[in-house]
Image (cartoon, rainbow, N blue to C red):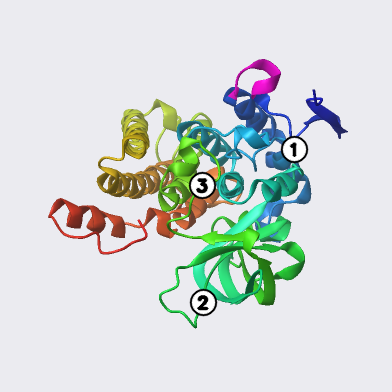
Amino acid sequence: MDEPTIGERDGIRLMNPLVNPRSIDGSNRPHRILEAVQAMAPLIAERRGEFDADRRLPDAVFAAMADAGLFRLWLPQSLGGPELSPLQFLDVVEAASTLDGSVGWLVGNGGGMSRIGGYIPEPVAREWFADRHTFVASSTGAIGSAIAVEGGYRVAGRWPFGSGAHHASHFMVLASNPEVPESPVICCYLDRKDVTVLDNWYVSGLRGTGSCDLEAHDIFVPAARAHLFIGLRPTQEGLLYRMPPVSVFSWSICGVPLGIAAGAMRSFVDVASRKGRLGVSGLLRDRETTHAIVGRMKATLRAARAGLCEAMKDLMDATQSGDGLTDARANLRTATAHAAEVSVCVTDMLATTAGAVAIFETCPLERAVRDVHAAVKHIAMSPNYYAVAGRLALGLDPGTARF
């Protein structure tokens, strides 16, 4: 039997990436992953100042995340991954986002992209994910070109929002054959050496994600490293890989705003326990209006999260049964949009209640406000999906294929 560990790095025990956690003790133990997230809190706090200054995560933080297995959360069990359920995955992304929005965003993106192990040929997946530091950066914000040639495609294009691009080992981009307009869009996987990362991530929030543009010029992509974007067939049996890919993609990051809001709540409690407001005697925590605001924000956030989880459970059931899948997909998207809106409302209200202290960079609420507003701009959480659900409820077609 393979050994579960392969050595140590900086005093941290490293797990063998090809050993299935179930083969060690009979359980997935997602709580161990959550413990690993919390263990990173001191390092993240120590290096957080570099996130904004460098517009990417420090190498040490990224390495710690990789060593904790946070970029392989949806890797199939048959390939040695934990293959977390969608709800377990949400727990991890939220926990990471509570520590820092950029950290949570890259956990959602990197851990979410490990699901490609359920779609690409098994030998390719085993080769890539044998390295625990494998990180697949994805960009779906544009479509490049893919010219069919013997054995694969010649791919070219420029794609935005490649989160984690500076640390990525592989890149997933969308491309289509311009000579065949009816040809479906395909996902193409490029090696690090074939991609130029354009250092243009100058933004207000989530600066540490390094979500830069990507360029590739006439790169050969073997057929084994490409598959359909919509309508792809899984190579693994797990429910996760049979669920609608666009829905799963949305789910991979929808926990980030919730986690940022939860982190803002923690920060507010700390501020309220130490600070007052100019012209008002006593601490913020001693004011009845503060009590009501905190209680209302907690209830609102919990309700949004509960609705999101219920929508995911319905989608899982619909995938298993084959019944009501369209409605379940639409309901998940509206739940995602609603949770995003609530997260913004909660974070903004807490920052407003804290007062002027929340505009200083030394206050975590300042970063939380910037990060949550940046996160919810993603198309996966777009309020446009309310219209999709409304169209379906009124007996119309959804108006889009990407929901």
Q: In this view, does 103 lie above or below 300?
A: below
The residue at the point 74 percent across, 63 percent down is: 192
Q: How many labels does the image show?
A: 3
Give the Cα separation between the discs numbered 2 and 3.
23 Å
First in residue order: circle 1 vs circle 2: 1
> Closer to the N terminus: mark 2 or mark 3?
2
Element carrying mark 2: loop
On screen, residue 14 above or below 167? above
Residue at 80%, 22% (x, y): give it. Answer: 1
Say whether marks 1 and 2 touch (CB < 8 Å): no
Q: In this view, does 331 lie to the left or right of 136?
A: left
Q: Look at mark 1 in the image and give the residue it sits on.
A: 67
Residue on which disc 2 sits? 177
The residue type indicated by label 3 comes to Pro
Instruction: Please give the name of the residue rendered at 51% of the width and 77% of the height, measured from the top-left corner.
Output: 177
Occupied quadrant, residue 171? bottom right
Q: How far apart are marks 1 and 2 (CA)?
A: 38 Å
What kind of residue is marked 1? Asp
Quadrant into which the C terminus falls: bottom left
Q: Residue 324's x, y, as percent?
A: 25, 42
Asked whether the viewer can see residue 204, the reply is no
Q: Can residue 42 be seen in this view?
A: yes
- Disc 3: which residue: 234
Q: Residue furthest left?
A: 394
Q: What stretch is highlighted in magenta?
A: 22-29
Q: Which amino acid does label 2 sit on?
A: Asn
Q: What element carries label 3?
A: loop
Question: Which x, y percent locates residue 372?
Answer: 47, 50
